[in-house]
Amino acid sequence: MDRLVITNVEVYRAIADDAYQEMAQLLKAGRRPKADGSPGWIITFDPNQTSFKRAMISIVFTGMWLEALMHLLIVRDYGEDKFKEYDWKSYEEKLTLLGCQEQELLRRVKRFRESRKFLVHEKAHFDDGEIKTAQDEAENAHEVLVAIHEYFSE
């Protein structure tokens, strides 16, 4: 007997995508070429940090979407007991269980998992020499969202 599954997975995907698209538009609108023609951009300061906020929304809702999707697919394909076994495992382990062997996608998912944790659970930290921006990580998150959506839509 099939059970009715109620999920917000598509709503989470839409929120993540909408926030990413708005962030990308804000970034494009907020920069212009240097007046002297040299390489690079002049970035307009945004005192409200709107592109950062949209990047964070995109990252958080991509995580919510991925969690909901993994739950849906694992329960559908393997049952609730298998999901309980995998509930606290990494996205990469869950995707591997579901048959994903694409190493580049798994690498991007690992990056997403690590950056999402870093950004969402911000702690005061010392400079480790690596510069990460929420906007760059939102771009990676969006690419993960699109790739996984396409992978499981085939």
Image (tube, rainbow, N blue to C red):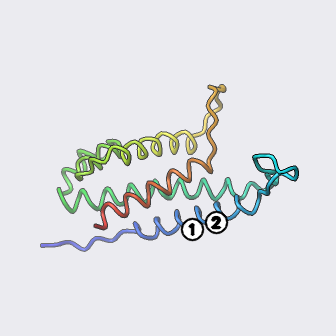
Q: Which residue is mark 2?
A: 22
What is the secondary structure assignment of the residue under circle 2? helix
**Residue at (23% x, 45% y) in the render:** 85
Q: Is residue 148 left or right of residue 154?
A: right
Name the outermost residue toward the front.
Answer: 37
Compared with 60, 29 (above or below) is: below
In the displayed structure image, the side of residue 105 where residue 17 appears, left or right: right
Rounded to the nearest angstrom, the CA distance separating label 2 from label 1 is: 6 Å
Residue lying at the far right of the rendered structure = 36
Q: CB under 8 Å between callouts 2 and 1?
A: yes
Residue drawn at (28%, 67%) of the image:
154
Q: Amino acid under label 1?
A: Asp
Are there few (<14), some (14-19), or many (20+) residues within 10 Å of tag 1?
A: some
In front of the other: 139 or 71: 139
- Asked which quadrant contains residue 54, the reply is bottom right
Residue topped by disc 1: 18
